[in-house]
Image (spheres, rainbow, N blue to C red):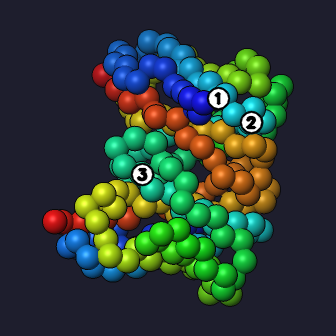
Amino acid sequence: NAGVTQTPKFQVLKTGQSMTLQCAQDMNHNSMYWYRQDPGMGLRLIYYSASEGTTDKGEVPNGYNVSRLNKREFSLRLESAAPSQTSVYFCASSARQGPYEQYFGPGTRLTVT
Amino acid sequence: EDKVVQSPLSLVVHEGDTVTLNCSYEVTNFRSLLWYKQEKKAPTFLFMLTSSGIEKKSGRLSSILDKKELFSILNITATQTGDSAIYLCAVYSAGSARQLTFGSGTQLTVLP
């Protein structure tokens, strides 16, 4: 089992460019999550998908969109990147929504210049 | 607003020392508290605690939750250089848009 995989590992964008971060899990989990991690701020939830076909905003959703493509895949899109979106992005999954262990992917380091 | 505060922010010890990391929280509708270890990459799960006073153990690591005083501690005995990492505490609050609220972490450095 690969667990949670993310692509790309690194990305540099210019302000205004768009891109999609991809995430896939092979653990047959129902729930998936996108976080960003900034120095001194911990992990903050951007969007989550409690189950296939549903998505909900988290704490910091502005400037992002998501798609739950199927049970395995959950993508995060930046339509018009801004320097404030420079961060490390983590995808995670859990068996179901709720107080359960989340498994994290390796992260994508994004720099917006 | 849900809040999770970890202390200390950073800690430097020598191999063989015992360390205690703290996590206090203020959330509505508490359901569980989770500890993660983050080295260079993804956080990896250590413990989940839901009940007060029941210690969870895994090797040299142990953790306990006090729901009355709203805190948890993570103990690491006989530290090794491989324990060097950021330790994250997170709290799940039912009905919260955040799902899991994370603290900002404790950076532990274990020197040989």
* Residue for badge 2: A29
Element assignment for label 2: loop
* Residue for badge 1: A25
Is residue B61 found left or right of B95 in the rendered image?
A: left
* Residue for badge 3: B38
Crowd around label 1: few <14 · some 14–19 · many ≥20 (10 Å):
many
Say yes or no: labels 2 and 3 on the same chain: no
Residue visible at 78% across and 36% down in the picture: A30
Element assignment for label 3: strand
Q: Residue B83, position in %: x, y?
A: 34, 61
Crowd around label 2: few <14 · some 14–19 · many ≥20 (10 Å):
many
3D distance between C-alphas at marks 2 and 3: 22 Å
Residue visible at 59% across and 25% down in the picture: A23
In the displayed structure, would residue B58 be above or below residue A4? below
Q: Considering depth in this image, is A20 or B87 the residue closer to the camera?
A: B87
Name which residue type carries label 1. Gln
Q: Residue A49, position in %: x, y?
A: 74, 34
Q: Are marks 2 and 1 in contact (CB under 8 Å)?
A: yes
Whether residue B99 is visible: yes
3D distance between C-alphas at marks 2 and 1: 7 Å
In the displayed structure, would residue A91 be above or below residue A97? above
Is residue B51 found left or right of A65 in the rendered image?
A: right
